[in-house]
Image (cartoon, rainbow, N blue to C red):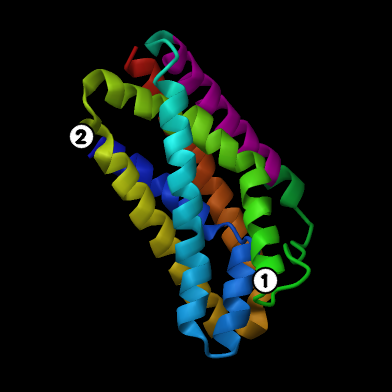
Amino acid sequence: MELLLLGAGMGVVGGLFPSPLHLIALSQVGLNRWLRALMVLVGVPLVVDGLLLLLTLFFYQHIPIEWAHDVAYVGGVTVIGFAIYALIESRGKQQDEVAESPHLTYTSVSAAVLAEIAAPGTWIYWLTIAGPILSEGRLRGYWHIVPFFAGSLLGYYGAAVSSLLLMVWGASLHKAFKRRLFTVANLLLLLLGISYLLRAYLSK
């Protein structure tokens, strides 16, 4: 249950953060192309995360368990620091559009995917959060960590689709709503960082 809740929380944070893929999906909903919107918002990240999962699993198969545990501390501290920094930086500032072109083209989707992959948060998650948990699966059996990744998937896609629907509903308040999502996501990220750090300390 602990891993399920942690994974779901991390997934919800990822789904709430406005991203280029959110904006492209929103433009497709505006054209009443719901299937394309869901393919952009759900299908593309599923492929990217699947590849990153395999890459992280391969990496953590070849490092000592002790190192993975130490990386978990780095992950918790980094997540807390990232959340605090983002909250401080966002005070009194408007969140601009995160993509210049929200239209659905191969170029815009490719640029959005590259932006997702290049984002520091992506690598923080996979190398310092998901990685040590994968290493825990190597030690205790991979069925033990399935709830974390199942929760992550449900949390991410549930939050991403829900936030898209809310953006559509409140289109006139789009920017204000995005600012609220950004704040809520960072507060949740702060709590999850503390929780993850405590889990790393208690599991040593």
Magenta range: 67-86
Looking at the figure, which quarter contains the N terminus?
A: top left
| Residue to which mark 1 is pinned | 176
Whether residue 28 appears in this view of the structure is yes
State the residue in front, 107 or 102: 107
Q: Is residue 56 left or right of residue 120?
A: left
| Amino acid bearing label 2 | Trp
Looking at the figure, which quarter contains the C terminus?
A: top left
Residue 93 position, x and y percent, is 79, 58
State the residue in front, 7 or 60: 60
Residue 162 position, x and y percent, is 44, 70
Residue at image x 45%, y 14%?
63
Residue at image x 55%, y 21%?
74
Q: Which labelled disc corresponds to residue 143?
A: 2
Whether residue 170 appears in this view of the structure is no
Mark toward the start of the polypeptide (1 vs 2): 2
